[in-house]
Image (tube, coloured by chain):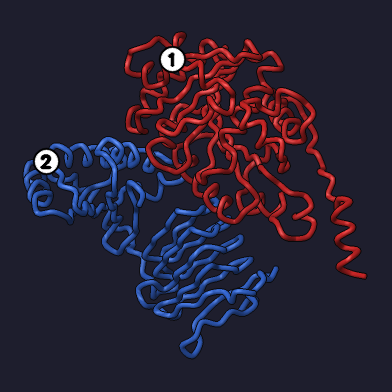
Chain colours: A red, B blue
Amino acid sequence: MPGRVITITSGKGGVGKTTATANIGVALARRGQRVACVDADIGLRNLDVVMGLENRIVYDLVDVVEGRARLRQALIKDKRLPELQLLPAAQTRDKSAVNEKQMTKLCDDLKKEFDFVLIDSPAGIERGFKNSIAPADELLIIVTPEVSAVRDADRVIGLVEANEKPSPKLIINRLRPAMVKRGEMMDTADVLEVLAIELIGIVPEDDTIITSTNKGQPVALEDRSAAGAAFTRIARRLLGEDVPFQVFDESPGLLERFARLFRNP
Amino acid sequence: MSVVSFKGTREGLSITLGEGTWHEILNELATQLNRPSAQSFFQGARVLLETGERALDALRLEELIALLAQHSMTLTSVSGETRTQEAFDQVRAAMPAPPESLALETRETPAPTASSNEAQAMLIHRTVRSGQTFNYAGTIVIIGDVNPGAEVVAEGDVIVWGKLRGVVHAGAAGNEDAVVGALILAPTQLRIGKQIARAPDDRRARHFPEVARVRDGHIVVEPWIGS
């Protein structure tokens, strides 16, 4: 059975596409799936850094497309999980180096060897975005609970639908339950009300993401962090498991309670 | 700007070509025309092509005419660069006259008129998302939400069976008798004819149907109860 090509995209930049791709890839690989993560952000590659594989790059996606390297030569095996591999983007070229047809061909080849092909899409709705969604069998849209991110996600969903792709699924990233509780942040229902697509995961804001990204150690390698656990749940849902949605502890923390005490004596 | 955009006019269906390679344009056009929901809407339409700054030669025009013909659509006029228009005259001269029956069929289709109550309506049955635009010479009826960033422009009324949160313009050709109605009326901006209103910055959407119309030169919003 050929694998599934899943593109992770958002429209807006900085909402966590690369982090999500790396972590969902890790979580799937930990469950024994053969996973290829493809960095489609040609010219601004990041996925290799987040996965901690930067120093192993010899060939990249453009080398494969242009016939300078075979797919096997360009794929980098993860140092921790043998089932996980990375196809890095070229750093010295730009988005015009590949077209939709070449991306589709590339993913067709990857599908034969892997259970999952995860494409990390660049931000925006231009060439690089189109290249990333052309080969997709499924799409995950990432959004943070902010009006601007939701607006961009809505635009991207419209474009995806116009391309006759199946309805994308939604990941709400960097949710801060305490802020939601105070009415300072959009909650899950607010986001879903506008976007009206199926939710596949909610990832809470988690400081460990920053350190793990800097170290190239995706949080989903371990189950300790809240974000890592959330990405693992998304991976399980992708595998067809019925995983209940976590209700994040929305009660204010100890500090918050103290602060309130002082505010309202 | 999208690759291809459609607009219903009194003379027929106007198709505007935007940015993109010729290949992308043909692809997009084919996709749009093949959409099941669009089939009946486009079937048999007379097409006015707006090519903008793009110069099309006879060969490309023929490709386009062939694509339209698959949906029983006929290209009746082209506006754009002189070169494109000359190419069109050339192609038309070489083309056999359209079969009589087809011509009759298209003539029978009533042109939408915004002023009459029997105006033809365009029905959109889905969520209209940010960046999407609908433009029609009659009334537009939407079953679904109109999200912020979306634009709906009608020469007649705009009726939304859902939440209206984008930009809406009814009576776009100047008809100030046009109305905008929605189950939840919370547009970013609402225009009727030449009048423009925006939601007050602190207005919270009310959870009952409302209708906006022009009264004494101002847009007023009132609960939507049957008249």
Viewer-closest of A40 and A247:
A40
Look at 75% across and 55% down and name the residue there.
Answer: A179
Label 2, residues with CA under 10 Å away: few <14, some 14-19, many ≥20: some
Look at 57% across and 36% down and name the residue there.
Answer: A17
Total numbered circles: 2
Along the horizontal axis of the image, is A181 left or right of B53?
right
Look at 70% across and 17% down and name the residue there.
Answer: A30
Viewer-closest of A48 and A245:
A48
For label 2, the SS is helix
State the mark number for residue B95. none
State the mark number for residue B58. 2
The amino acid on which the numbered mark 1 sits, given as a three-letter code, is Val
Task: State the image coordinates of residue A82 (x, y, percent, origin top left).
Answer: 63, 10
Along the horizontal axis of the image, is A189 left or right of B199?
right
Residue B171 versus residue A124 in the image, above or below: below
Viewer-closest of A251 and B138:
A251
Along the horizontal axis of the image, is B213 left or right of A60?
right
Along the horizontal axis of the image, is B187 left or right of B70?
right
Task: State the image coordinates of residue A109 (x, y, percent, origin top left).
Answer: 45, 14
Q: Choose top left, top right, bottom left or bottom right for residue B177.
A: bottom left
Return the chain for callout 1. A
Q: Write down the residue under mark 1.
A: A58
Q: Quadrant of the N terminus of chain A?
A: top right
Q: Choose top left, top right, bottom left or bottom right for residue A35.
A: top right
Task: State the image coordinates of residue A97 (x, y, percent, origin top left).
Answer: 33, 28
Asked if disc 2 and disc 1 are in contact, CB closer than 8 Å, the reply is: no
For label 1, the SS is loop
The mark closer to the camera, 2 or 1, is 1
The amino acid on which the numbered mark 2 sits, given as a three-letter code, is Ala
Q: Quadrant of the C terminus of chain A?
A: bottom right
Return the chain for callout 2. B
